[in-house]
Image (spheres, grey):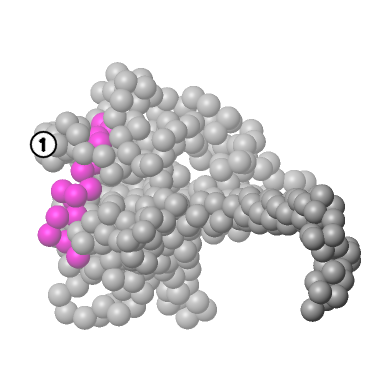
Amino acid sequence: MTFKRVVSHEIFGHRLVSRSKSPVISIVLFSLLIFFMFAYSIISNMSLQSAAFNVLPISFTISTQRNMIVEGDSENDQFHRGIRRKLPENEIFRSDELTEKFHGRVQEFFNHKCEVQFFMTWISTESFGAREILAVESVFKAHPHGCLMILSRTLDSAQGHMILKPLLDRGFKVQAVTPDLPFLLNNTPAEAWFNDIKSGEKDPGGIPLAQNLSNLMRLAALYKYGGVYLDTDFIVLKSFKGLKNTIGAQSINSAKNWTRLNNAVLVFDKNHPLLYKFIEEFALTFDGNKWGYNGPYMVSRVVHRVEGRPGYNFTILPPVAFYPVDWIKIVSLFKVPSQQADPKWFEAKLQELNEKSYGLHLWNKQSSKLMVEEGSAMGKLLSEHCVLCNQIYSS
């Protein structure tokens, strides 16, 4: 037994001599052992902290991408907040003194003796350009005693007044009014749709919301007040006085049957049932990710279903009435005909436009960046159908 207590033991590769034989050496070696164990513990903790520090940015990035989701958020709340982030900061949603006065201003304006009452919409935050002014001028060239209301908060301002002042100074009846969409959509099938869009319950989609709000606003304004709606890239060539409850075909087939309608020009009485159907279809089938789905394609779908049914009284005019030149060929009207081009076609097209067309849609999506060349068909048309006739060749 005494022998075993004297014999040394192997611990961590070191020989520890019995304390009874070497007490000082034993104490030193024991201290070294404690030191190594302590150092190992510190290094391990530092490694864990370093690992946690490296993971933290990843965790933070995930939280940021989820819009800093807090505990207790439901998936529904997260979805709606995501939709609200997609909504533009659009003035069209704001209610103030201007929107409260909307209906009264409309009634007062159209209380004048109007040859025809026209509507345009302008939801852009930018002001009218030269081309839009020429479109407005063409309305009054064909209707000196007509009344044009532009539904626009942007133009219902001091700057907007200055833009329209040259026309007002010549006695033309034109006014920009901030629209009240909740009022326009009240008691229509699109009232709930608008509330859902505004609150974030419905996804507005990838198409600019202003475009789809314009599609809806024109329908609601005509349903509430009646009249003529025109896009701001439409040049009026002759009077609309004889038109009633009319929509135009954009294209026809070989049998002369329409294949697609368009909503750039609409002529309808107040409370017309077809307008109600348009508004209903807009709200029920809205898709904010397909261009034209809530506009030209929507009116085409509805008319295809109701055409010929009793209770719907309306006329479909052929393309030559409002869309005599399609969006592919519109570019040619802005340019001077080349020497190789047939001059007879040029003259024939101008004659057709002046004799058979109520107006010409410029398809701004394709032509907005084109300049009107002197000597072009477009230059000639604009010169003949303007009243101020400024900036024709810079439009």
Which residue lies at the image location 49% right of the left edge and 31% below the top edge?
130
Q: Can residue 292 be seen here?
A: no
Crowd tier of the residue under label 1, counting other residues whose Cα lies within 10 Å: few below 14, some 14–19, many 20 or above: few
| Residue at 41 percent of width and 46 percent of height | 88
> Which quadrant of the structure image shows residue 144?
top left
Toward the viewer: 234 or 387?
234
**Which residue is located at x 42 percent, y 25 percent?**
388
In the depicted structure, whether residue 372 falls above or below residue 296: above
Q: Viewer-proximal residue, 389 or 349?
A: 389
- Percent across and percent down for residue 167 are 33, 25
- The number of numbered badges drawn on the structure is 1
Residue reaching furthest front?
2
Going by the image, does 387 lie left or right of 153? right
Quadrant of the rendering where the N terminus is positioned: bottom right
Could you tell me residue 191's position as x and y percent?
Answer: 20, 59
Looking at the rendered image, the quarter that the C terminus falls into is top right
Measuring 35% from the left and 26% from the top, which residue is drawn there? Answer: 160
State the residue in front, 214 or 150: 214
- What percent of the width, then of the height, locates residue 142? 34, 39
For residue 329, which quarter of the picture?
A: bottom right
- List x then y, in percent, for residue 381: 51, 40
Q: Secondary structure at mark 1?
A: helix
Residue 85 visible to an observer of this rendering: yes
Residue 11 drawn in magenta: no
Specify the quadrant of the image occupied by residue 114: top left
Viewer-proximal residue among 30 and 190: 30
* Residue 67 falls left or right of residue 178: right
Residue tagged by mark 1?
104
Q: Is residue 181 magenta?
A: yes
Q: Which residues are magenta?
A: 175-189
Question: Which amino acid is tagged 1?
Answer: Gly
